[in-house]
Amino acid sequence: MEKVFDIDLFVSSTPYHVIVSCAFMKEGDYLIIENNESIDDYIINNYVKKKFKNRIISVDYYRNLFKKDVFRAKRNFSKIKKVLKNIKINNIYIFNDAEPYGQYLFKHYKQSKHCILEEGIGLYNDMYHRKWLIKLIYGKFFFGYWYTVIKRIGEYKYSEFIFSKDNKLLSNKQLSKKIIYENYKKIDDLLIESNEKIKRKIWFISQPLVEDEICESNLYDAFFSSLVKIASENNIVISLKPHPRENIKKYSKFSKDIEIVNKKNIPFELLLDTSEKVYLFTISSSAVFKFSEINNVEICFLHKLIKTKIDYSNITCNEYKKDVIKTYDDLNKIIRRINNV
């Protein structure tokens, strides 16, 4: 079979990754989707199939090195290799080089350019690794010498290019790569096309902090209880947008006081209607950054109100600088102000 040239490969594991991949791709490119079940049918039918057509490789979701995920990942390495056998890949675009799929591709496709696309503040914060030494030894045993545990996205030794909005937030090791400035305006047209927009005044964009063991469940529950209590006392109902990897059962006891927007497999960027004034509250979600320059949108970060294992101070820097709420009294004042608007 004759080789196919001038092809780029994108690797996505979240709905937002898929949207960015659709914005950056060109005709003929391929897409690897990790965990296809987490991507809403609306995105698959209206974006993925229209853009990538039949050039899609679905692989099992990888989350835990100490479970059966490792065997499924190795099986998928063979699947990827078989599909790409007669294809010459120019650029490989991934969002996270800490995961085995990205490391495997960067190591085994040496002739390609290895690129990291920014997915938000994850690029600028150190990752939390539980039992990192055991994970390193276990990973090298099952995957091979090329697998390693890295401190930050973009620091894998075979990563070459990093697409970043702000190189002042990068580590020295990240800066040793070739940095390409990218403001991600390419996705704007895709967001405008969305038919899933929901008009709500006040949103809380959540994250899988408990699921990823970044925050203790009792601390998160206490934080969210306080948020809901303050909102309820001011006759405000918060609309909650869960993260695709969250277990939304943890919000069930708040169901009478909040609105759970059950579209967790659609990126928030496709849902938000900004035709009227809206207020976005989040601990540290990158989903809000796309709206930081829109006059109708007010963003409030709440990471100072909860103890986590990751330092989120970078989100107060430069273009990410928005209101950072430091006390519950300050939160109460802001919500009271919103109620009077």
Image (tube, helix red, strand yellow):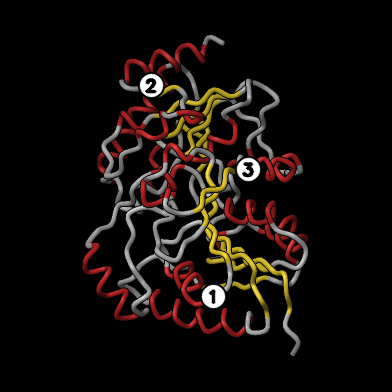
Per the image, label 2 sits on a secondary structure element best described as helix
Residue type for callout 1? Tyr
Q: Residue at x 37, y 79 (%)?
A: 143
2 to 261, vertically: above or below: below
Alpha-carbon span between mark 3 and mark 1: 26 Å
Horizontal side of 301 relative to 269 (left or right) equals left
Q: Quadrant of the N terminus?
A: bottom right
Q: Residue at x 45, y 13 (%)?
A: 336
Disc 3 designates what residue?
184
175 to 324, vertically: above or below: below
For the image shown, how many numbered marks are present on the structure? 3
Residue type for callout 2? Ile
Q: Nearer the viewer, mark 2 or mark 1?
A: 1
Disc 1 designates what residue?
109
Horizontal side of 121 relative to 223 (left or right) equals right
Q: Residue at x 44, y 61 (%)?
A: 97
The disc, 3 or 1, on the residue closer to the chain's N-terminal end is 1
Alpha-carbon span between mark 2 and mark 3: 35 Å
Give the image quarter of residue 24: bottom right
218 to 279, vertically: above or below: below
Q: List x then y, in percent, for residue 188.
A: 70, 40
Disc 2 designates what residue?
230
Residue type for callout 3? Tyr
Alpha-carbon span between mark 2 and mark 1: 53 Å
Q: List x then y, in percent, for residue 322.
A: 47, 24
Using the rendered image of the protein, determine whether residue 36 is visible from the camera's viewpoint: no
The disc, 2 or 3, on the residue closer to the chain's N-terminal end is 3
The disc, 2 or 1, on the residue closer to the chain's N-terminal end is 1
Per the image, label 3 sits on a secondary structure element best described as loop
Per the image, label 1 sits on a secondary structure element best described as loop
Q: Nearer the viewer, mark 2 or mark 3?
A: 3
Disc 3 packing (10 Å; few <14; some 14–19; many ≥20): some
